[in-house]
Image: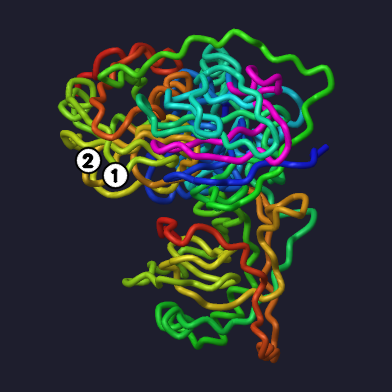
């Protein structure tokens, strides 16, 4: 880390929140002999480190590594060429100057949404607002894909402020349709295919195909992608089923989102 | 590229899938690596019929399978040893056999191990998804598992392709599966006793094992922390410990992220043996130096 004066006051809540405070250094954990799990204190630091790793991979200054997999508070770096490379990076990485994520320049992926989900009223009650206001606030938020998982094409989108985080449903649905837009914890997600699921469903994205193996890239959402939901005001679902095609998948997939 | 002919499935067996080297490098998109569970046997099958190691083979599960060659081809059965027959007549395991058009190649039930590999000159020619023909049972990517009557194309053998005639020796699975394990990344979620239990307890391969993971039966690993982790990346070979405490070893079709702690990781080179361990086989985890970050992990750290 570069030298920077620590705040003179003893660290308290105010100091912790102070933007000039150096973030806690990442904790680096072994993953076999050729991998590392880098653990960070916050989602923001995790996304910033992931962006930095991609920059360094692109400019050739990161040793070749097979997988870079972000999680909620971690980045997994797996399959370095040798354990010596993994060790060297583990020693070097805590000293990196990682720039914070900047609210963006560049393209934002727009996902048209009808806010008609079966849990919209429940979410509105949890937020203490009217259902229309849930739609307005959700659509006014800029999201970012923090990480992917559960199924190819499923992104965990961050961006909603903490007061809008909601629990998963007490009873998961046995079948959530393709294109459903849901909330759980800090995340928003769009189901790339029908599957079991416990997220609170607030809408439908009828025009967006999140996963298509005939397309390059197959996944519309990758870690770091910026996303905005655009309300489809006043549009009625078409009678012939207003959903993107369901690419299908094993029906017995373990339910997680 | 595709030659006339191909294969017709006469008997699909318990589970027969198309496999190759899989789809590494897409874990960040939620795409499992997939690919042959016993990569050594898969590579050997290709070598023996003159294919590059990236060509697709058929991976069987316990009960083998039977396919009819719709045009003349050369085939071989490797991996789990099993009785091999061509049109009902015994044929050698581990050696290439010539099939005339219409001949039925039968790989019988495994006499040792779990998964046999059927290689064909030119390779199985299913469509590629993200660069691979592998069937991924977690995500449903790649061709569906074989069904009786299903027809699969074969690729054209590479011009000048030369088979490597000497079958490499195949190690018969012993009475016990020994898996080296380096502790971490979440060994600190377990008590010292839990860490010791992993490397001193006797586990058995559960019948619930599949291409996603080798499940075990045995003593539960005591945890010092309850609850779930925030979702994090899961490596191949991870030993994930769900709340009931029995270790699950992640194989090729494993989920790319998860919320249960990973107590240790088994090197990829040891996973072929895991893929050949039949239900009921004794499993012993042996500690290895992780060597990567935190130094020696040969003994459970005191805490």
Q: Nearer the viewer, residue A56 or B245?
A: B245
**Where residue A158 sits in the image (x, y, percent)?**
55, 58
Q: Secondary structure at mark 1?
A: loop
Residue at 61 percent across and 19 percent down: it is: B96
Marks 1 and 2, Cα distance to the nearest angstrom?
A: 6 Å
**Residue A210: x and y, percent?**
66, 61
Secondary element under disc 2, as helix, strand or loop, is loop
Q: Which residues are magenta?
A: B45-74
Residue B73 on the magenta span? yes
Queried whether the magenta region covers residue B89, the answer comes back as no
Here the colouring is rainbow
Residue A114 as seen in the image, left or right of residue B115: right
User: Measured from the top left, where is residue B272 in percent x and y?
Assistant: 45, 24
Q: Residue at x 59, y 76 (%)?
A: A137
Asked whether, in this view, residue A100 is left or right of residue B153, the answer is left
Number of numbered discs overlaid on the protein picture: 2
Query: Height in image: A232 above or below B21?
Result: below
Residue that label 1 marks: B242
Asked whether residue B184 appears in the rendered view, the answer is no
Q: Quadrant of residue A55?
A: top right
Crowd around label 2: few <14 · some 14–19 · many ≥20 (10 Å): some
Location of the N terminus of chain B by quadrant is: top right
Label 1–label 2 contact, CB within 8 A: yes
Residue at image mark 2: B245
Q: Quadrant of residue B108?
A: top left
Residue B19 point in image, percent of width and height: 58, 36
Q: What residue is at 41 percent from the left and 83 percent from the top?
A: A125
Q: Quadrant of residue A179?
A: bottom right
Instruction: Decide if residue B238 is in sight here.
Output: yes
Q: Could you tell me which chain the residue with mark 2 belongs to? A: B
In this view, B107 is above or below A172: above
């Amino acid at each position: 880390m570069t030298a920077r004066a620590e705040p003179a006051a003893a660290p308290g809540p105010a100091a912790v929140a102070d933007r000039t405070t150096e973030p806690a250094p990442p904790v680096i954990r072994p993953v076999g002999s050729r991998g590392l799990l880098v653990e960070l204190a916050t989602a923001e630091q995790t996304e910033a480190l992931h962006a930095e790793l991609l920059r360094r991979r692109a400019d050739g200054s990161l040793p070749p590594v097979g997988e870079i997999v972000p999680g909620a508070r971690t980045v997994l770096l797996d399959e370095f060429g040798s354990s010596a490379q993994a060790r060297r990076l583990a020693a070097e990485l805590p000293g990196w100057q990682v720039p914070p994520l900047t609210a963006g320049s560049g393209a934002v992926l727009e996902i048209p949404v009808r806010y008609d989900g079966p849990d919209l009223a429940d979410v509105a009650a949890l937020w203490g607002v009217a259902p229309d206001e849930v739609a307005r606030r959700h659509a006014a938020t800029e999201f970012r894909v923090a990480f992917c998982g559960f199924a190819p094409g499923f992104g965990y989108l961050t961006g909603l402020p903490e007061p809008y985080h909601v629990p998963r449903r007490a009873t998961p649905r046995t079948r959530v349709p393709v294109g459903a837009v849901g909330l759980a914890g800090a995340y928003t997600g769009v189901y790339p295919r029908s599957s079991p699921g416990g997220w609170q469903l607030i809408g439908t994205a009828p025009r967006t195909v999140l996963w298509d193996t005939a397309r390059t890239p197959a996944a519309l959402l990758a870690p770091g992608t910026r996303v905005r939901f655009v309300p489809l005001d006043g549009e009625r679902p078409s009678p012939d089923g207003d959903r993107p095609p369901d690419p299908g998948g094993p029906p017995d997939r373990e339910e997680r989102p | 590229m595709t030659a006339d002919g191909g294969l017709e499935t006469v008997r699909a067996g318990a589970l027969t899938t198309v496999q190759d080297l899989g789809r590494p490098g897409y874990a960040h998109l939620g795409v499992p690596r997939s690919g042959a569970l016993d990569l050594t046997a898969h590579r050997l099958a290709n070598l023996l019929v003159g294919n590059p190691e990236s060509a697709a083979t058929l991976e069987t599960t316990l009960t083998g399978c039977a396919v009819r060659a719709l045009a003349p081809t050369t085939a071989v059965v490797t991996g789990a040893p099993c009785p091999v027959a061509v049109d009902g007549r015994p044929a050698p395991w581990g050696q290439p056999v010539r099939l005339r058009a219409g001949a039925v190649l039968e790989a019988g039930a495994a006499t040792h191990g779990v998964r046999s590999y059927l290689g064909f000159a030119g390779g199985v020619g299913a469509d590629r998804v993200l660069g691979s023909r592998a069937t991924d049972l977690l995500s449903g990517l790649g061709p569906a598992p074989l069904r009786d009557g299903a027809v699969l194309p074969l690729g054209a053998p590479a011009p000048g392709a030369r088979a490597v005639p000497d079958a490499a020796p195949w190690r018969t699975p012993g009475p016990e599966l020994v898996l080296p394990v380096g502790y971490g990344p979440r060994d600190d979620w377990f008590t010292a006793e839990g860490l010791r239990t992993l490397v001193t307890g006797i586990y058995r391969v559960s019948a619930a094992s599949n291409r996603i993971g080798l499940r075990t039966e045995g003593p539960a690993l005591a945890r010092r922390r309850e609850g779930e982790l925030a979702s994090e990346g899961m490596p191949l070979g991870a030993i994930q410990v769900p709340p009931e405490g029995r270790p699950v070893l992640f194989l090729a079709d494993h989920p790319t992220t998860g919320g249960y702690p990973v107590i240790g990781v088994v090197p990829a080179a040891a996973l072929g043996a895991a893929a050949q361990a039949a239900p009921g086989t004794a499993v012993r985890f042996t500690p290895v130096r992780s060597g990567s970050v935190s130094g020696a992990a040969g003994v459970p750290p005191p805490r």
